[in-house]
Image (cartoon, helix red, strand yellow):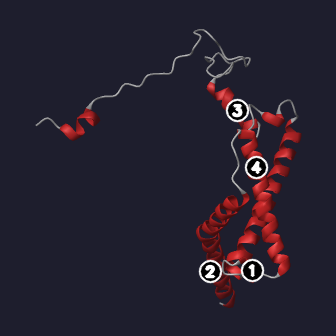
Amino acid sequence: MCGWPNAKALKPRRQLMASTFAVGRVCKISGCAGPARVGQRCWSHYRQFREQVPADRGKGLGIYRGLPRKLILELASLKRVERLRGRQRQFEARELLFGKAGGRMMSLPFEQRLFVNRLSHESYERHIFRCYLGGVLPMSFRAYRRRWYGAQKTNWRRFDVPRMVSERLATARGEVISRL
């Protein structure tokens, strides 16, 4: 019996340590004699350095380079609040469009239709900007709107409906417990 399906699993595996590019390079942090793996730091100091600064998708530290830590935290907090506000607006639009109007925008009152329409146009402007940065031709507005609507419907089904149901159940349980 050759043990064919499990032959690879039975072989002892050797782990190879990643070698440094330049042998003899040491971490630049004083008191640390570990080998420099990333730039001029060892892995543990590099991890500490990265934890100090919130992740930014720009190059390196992006807009945070050279700023004091308190200011970085404040900017990251403002960015987080802005993102949360945008998500909340998208949720309100989905709730109007799929919760109240049953998926038909013309079923909404005029002001609510304008709100949903404004959100889709803002989203299209972001799409155009991203395409411009990437050097790609943007979709036409009609094509983008169709795609945006489908994505909103998927997010409504996948995230919003289950969350609303769980919130209702939690409030119902709270009411039952408070009656006891």
Local crowd size for mark 4, using a 10 Å CA cut-off: few (<14), some (14–19), many (≥20): some
Please tell me in which quadrant of the rendered image residue 70 appears: top right
Residue 152: assigned label: none
Q: Which percent across, then down, holds residue 152?
A: 66, 66
Disc 1 to disc 2: CB gap under 8 Å: no
Label 3 or label 2, whichever comes before in sequence order: 3
For discs 1 and 2, the disc positioned in front in the rendered view: 1
Q: Amino acid at mark 4?
A: Ile
Label 1's element?
helix
Residue designated by label 4? 128
Dot placed on the residue nearer the N-terminal end, 3 or 1: 3
To which residue does mark 1 refer?
Answer: 106
**Pointer 3 with pointer 2, Cβ within 8 A:** no
Q: Which residue is mark 3?
A: 48
Question: Mark 3 against mark 1, which lies toward the viewer?
Answer: 1
Image quadrant assignment for residue 75: top right
Residue at mark 2 to residue at mark 4: CA–CA distance:
41 Å
Q: Is residue 24 above or below residue 11?
A: above
Depicted 74 relative to depicted 21: above or below: below
Q: In this view of the protein, which residue sits in the foreground, 134 or 48?
A: 134
Q: Where is mark 2, residue-wise? A: 169
